[in-house]
Image (cartoon, rainbow, N blue to C red):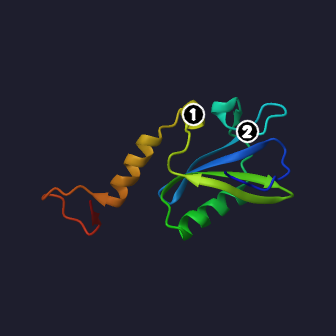
Amino acid sequence: MYVQEYLENDGKDLRICVIGKDIFTAYWRVGAEGEFLHNVAQGGSLCFEFIPQEACDLVLNVSKQLNINHAGFDVLISGGHFYILEFNVLFGNMGITKSGLSVEKAIYEYLLSEFVPPFPTSPTTKKVI
């Protein structure tokens, strides 16, 4: 059983995706009229405009403090406050796909920037996979 306090909101929440140390993308998930869920797979719609910087800063701070380098954060605004409802690495990415972005490519590029393949001809001071 999962119990959560109901937080008044205006029928939408934010999905903020972190890859590496940066926000990869962020968008609103707007629920259908009268619906509790905002998920795109549950009939919600997307909006990539007017993303509050304060919400992005909160997510970046939490991901840095917890050493998270890949996750989708769900953020709700209620009573003028930002609440992280959940975050996980196995998040739905229909919204990302619809925007034309590639999570796989971004993760691959992040890994290449952080780790060097273990080939004998690649001298480096970076971490080796």
Q: Quadrant of residue 127?
A: bottom left
Which of 118 and 35 lies nearest the eye of the viewer? 35
From the top left corner, tell me how far across and down residue 12 is, in percent.
77, 42
Q: Quarter-wise, where is residue 49 in the image? A: top right
Tally the numbered discs. 2
- State the image coordinates of residue 46 (x, y, percent, origin top left): 69, 34
**Proximity of marks 2 and 1: CB atoms separated by less than 8 Å:** no
Residue 77 locus on image (x, y percent) = 79, 53
Query: Is 73 placed above or below 104 here?
Result: below
Question: Which amino acid does the dot numbered 1 rest on?
Answer: Met
- Is residue 22 or residue 68 the one in the foreground? 68
Residue linked to disc 2: 37
Label 2 residue SS: loop
Mark number, residue 94: 1
Label 2: how many residues lie within 10 Å, few (<14), some (14-19) or many (20+)? Answer: some
Q: Residue at x 63, y 60 (%)?
A: 59
In the displayed structure, does residue 21 sit left or right of residue 111? right
